[in-house]
Amino acid sequence: MRDLRESRRAYRSIEVDLDALTEEGLWTASTQFRRELQRIPEINRLKRQFQGECFVVPEWLHTGDRVHYGARIYFFREEESVTPEDVIQKNIDAIPSDSFHNFERYQGRLHGYPDCCIDFYHERTSNAPAPEWRSIKPFADQINDEALGNGSSAPIDDVLPRFSEWEDRYAFFAREFFPEPGCETALTKGRAIYDGLSSEYSTRLVEEYFGLTFGYNYLVARAVHTGGSHRPTPGDLGREHLRFYLPLRELLTTSRYS
């Protein structure tokens, strides 16, 4: 916990200077920002513990007259890795030209998402619901919105009754991944992830992981649809949601998942 507190303090203390919205200016700011990010204790711990390739990069987003920035950590198998410079360059290329959708497609392929789902996610028109909501809408009537108002006191089973009976639940295997309804490619990938996790961990833990992932995506999609703040905070989906922010090693010591 001390490392986590120190990591948060270190991240919040970073100051990023962007002199000009040009490739040179973005590279200079990225290099400085990444140098500071690499000093954060939690990032160094992840790099030591992960058996493949792990690195952190700055991430830039240009909206209107503002440039937003943050950090993203990538994990790759050693034989599948790209370089941090590759990712930074793709991101920088998208900023002055306002073509961030190209960078999002690149990220989707890095994460291994099928092209059909990447295409679906980018099908946005002014006269149709956003793809996030179109992905979630077929399940909206099976969610107990009243239980969501109880915060961390409600179990995930109250929020998503009978979730384990949903065949399509496998398609929601990652947060903020919104597959086209009925997409067989996403279902196949999700089943493989479910089986792989189930071979290592308890069925209850895996079921709740998929349930919490779906619930998180539901809240994001609903906020996109209604124009609200779109990232849930720990506990919004019940007590299991709060518990899932523990390190996995600690989570596995609880009687619920041991």
Image (cartoon, rainbow, N blue to C red):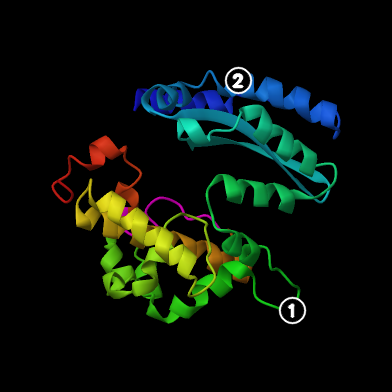
Splitting the image into 4 quarters, where does residue 252 fall?
A: top left
User: In the shown orientation, is residue 250 left or right of residue 28?
Assistant: left
Q: Residue furthest front?
A: 79
- At a point 54% along the width and 33% down the height, the residue shown is 81
Q: Is residue 192 above or below residue 62?
A: below
Three-letter amino acid code at the position of disc 1: Asn
Residue in the foreground of this view, choosing between 137 and 180: 180
Please say if 78 is above or below 251: above
Residue 16 location (% of width, % of height):
70, 26
Tell me, yes or no, if residue 151 can be seen here. no
Which stretch appears magenta?
A: 230-240
> Looking at the image, is mark 2 or mark 1 earlier in the sequence?
2
Q: Which residue is mark 2?
A: 36
Q: Give residue 179's position: percent from left, percent from top.
A: 52, 66
Left or right side of 78 for 2: left
Give me the residue at 61% from left, 46% from top. Answer: 107
| Residue 11 falls in image quadrant | top right
The residues bearing labels 2 and 1 have C-alpha atoms spaced at a distance of: 43 Å
Q: Is residue 205 above or below residue 69?
A: below
Q: Amino acid at mark 2?
A: Glu
Where disc 2 sits, the SS reads helix
Secondary structure under tag 1 reads loop
Please provide percent x and percent y for residue 12.
57, 29
Q: Which residue is mark 1?
A: 127
Q: Which mark is residue 109?
A: none
Residue at 18% of width from left, 49% of height from top? 257
Residue 233 lies in the magenta stretch: yes
Dominant secondary structure of the magenta stretch?
A: loop
At 39% from the left and 75% from the top, the residue drawn is 143
